[in-house]
Image (tube, helix red, strand yellow):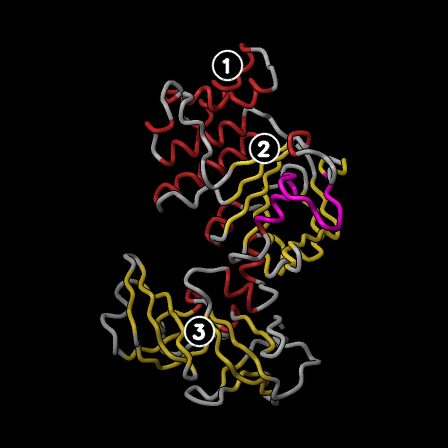
């Protein structure tokens, strides 16, 4: 196992600046997920750690050693790619042990390591097959097994589940999470899927345009996003954003809307920093799970009750996602399956104001 330290790292391809001054420390044994939209620089950053890309500026240290000028094979890392990269003419056992044979390891030790990795991944019965005889999920397990037998300081995963169907992705996420718990090796995982990031990570590093937008524990980013971008990227379905202005008054702070009812929503005490001026344009961020069908004759403290018409209903089984408008903007509510029977129905909804997010409309930074 090893700590990874990245300092002031830049990567340019001609005039294109792919990674822009990344500073990142990954603790020994941590499972870190680099996530973000396509083109944000996450795979480029991973490839510089692996040594597959030369850096333009900065420093990468693994286990206390600066590895800028080291070849990939000397960095003691193992990488699992999106495509399985298995040798079609070799049996599964030969594929898993290929790197060990290349290092002239004794045959009994190779067999022992291959057997242990296969047992860990539940593919012992597949060792005598060829890759063409395996499913996609089985092939990915073989690729992971090939990395495990190396016993590296760090595992690097570059979108390894992208080629699998939804059910297999769910299964493999569980396998990778369990694997990390068992072996405790530092893992760095790249994905564009925020569900993978939330379920796998000890820490999420959310990237945008070659820089780190926010880094921290999954729930910290989900519940306390630093910007509209973070809030909109994490969460499925996505957070709704309603423009308004800050209305300060004797009764406390509120968000006032330029159109539609209600005219304003009261904010919890202390929710807006004192230095924010009255009439500052804001964005009110509301997640679907923070809106429910009204319960009781009067709303509880911190709850705003509104009357809404359901424009679109999307049942998912135990829950339904209902689209309504707040100040003219479509917003989703996550309701119980039978709370609404059809689109066009008018119902009362409760919004939990203690769990909303507020952003400066100009900078899109969280308040």
Q: CA distance from mark 1 to mark 2?
A: 19 Å
Say which residue label 2 marks: 78
Observer-nearest residue: 58 or 192? 58
Q: Does residue 76 appear in this view?
A: yes
Observer-nearest residue: 88 or 82? 88
The reply to whether the C-beta atoms of the residues labelled 3 and 2 are less than 8 Å apart is: no
> Horizontal and vertical percent for residue 367?
63, 73
Circle 3 SS class? strand
The reply to whether the C-beta atoms of the residues labelled 1 and 2 are less than 8 Å apart is: no
The reply to whether the C-beta atoms of the residues labelled 3 and 1 are less than 8 Å apart is: no
Asked whether, in this view, residue 179 is left or right of residue 45, the answer is left
Residue at the (62%, 35%) spot, across then down: 154
User: In the picture, which quadrant includes the N terminus?
Assistant: top right
Circle 1 SS class? helix
Asked whether, in this view, residue 181 is left or right of residue 71, the answer is left
> Horizontal and vertical percent for residue 149?
55, 24
Q: How many marks?
A: 3
Residue at the (43%, 46%) spot, across then down: 162
Q: CA distance from mark 3 to mark 1?
A: 60 Å
Which is in the foreground here, disc 3 or disc 2? Answer: 2
Q: Is residue 140 above or below residue 198?
A: above
Magenta span includes 47: yes
Res. 269 mark: none
Residue at the (29%, 72%) spot, across then down: 312
Res. 351 mark: 3
Range drawn in magenta: 43-61
> Horizontal and vertical percent for residue 292?
38, 69
Mark 2 or mark 3, which is nearer the start of the sequence?
2
Q: Is residue 323 above or below residue 81?
A: below
Say which residue label 1 marks: 111
């Amino acid at each position: 196992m090893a700590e990874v330290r990245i300092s002031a790292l830049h990567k340019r391809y001609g005039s294109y600046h792919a990674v822009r001054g990344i500073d990142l420390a990954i603790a020994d044994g941590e499972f870190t997920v680099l996530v973000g939209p396509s083109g944000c620089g996450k795979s480029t950053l991973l490839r510089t750690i692996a040594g597959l890309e030369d850096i333009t500026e900065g420093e990468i240290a693994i286990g206390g050693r600066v590895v800028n000028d080291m070849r990939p094979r000397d960095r003691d890392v193992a990488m699992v790619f999106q495509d399985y990269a298995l040798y079609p003419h070799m049996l599964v056992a030969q594929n898993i042990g290929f790197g060990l044979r290349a290092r002239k390891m004794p045959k009994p030790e190779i067999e022992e390591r291959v057997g242990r990795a296969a047992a860990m991944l539940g593919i012992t019965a597949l060792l005598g097959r060829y890759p063409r005889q395996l499913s996609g999920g089985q092939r990915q397990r073989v690729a992971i097994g090939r990395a495990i037998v190396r016993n590296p300081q760090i595992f690097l995963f570059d979108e390894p589940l992208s080629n699998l169907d939804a059910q297999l992705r769910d299964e493999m996420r569980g396998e990778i999470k369990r694997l990390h718990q068992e072996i405790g090796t530092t893992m760095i995982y790249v994905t564009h899927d925020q569900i993978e990031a939330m379920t796998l990570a000890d820490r999420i590093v959310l990237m945008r345009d070659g820089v780190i937008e926010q880094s921290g524990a999954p729930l910290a980013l989900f519940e306390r996003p630093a910007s509209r971008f973070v809030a909109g990227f994490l969460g499925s379905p996505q957070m709704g954003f309603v423009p308004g202005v800050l209305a300060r008054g004797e009764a406390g702070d509120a968000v006032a809307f330029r159109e539609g009812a209600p005219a304003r929503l009261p904010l919890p005490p202390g929710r807006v920093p004192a230095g924010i001026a009255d009439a500052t344009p804001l964005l009110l961020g509301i997640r679907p799970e923070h809106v429910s069908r009204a319960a009781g004759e009067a709303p509880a403290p911190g709850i705003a009750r509104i009357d809404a018409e359901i424009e679109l209903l999307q049942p998912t089984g135990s829950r339904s996602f209902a689209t309504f408008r707040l100040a003219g903007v479509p917003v989703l509510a996550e309701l119980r399956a039978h709370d609404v029977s059809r689109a066009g129905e008018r119902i009362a909804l409760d919004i939990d104001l203690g769990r909303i997010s507020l952003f400066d409309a100009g900078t899109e930074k969280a308040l």
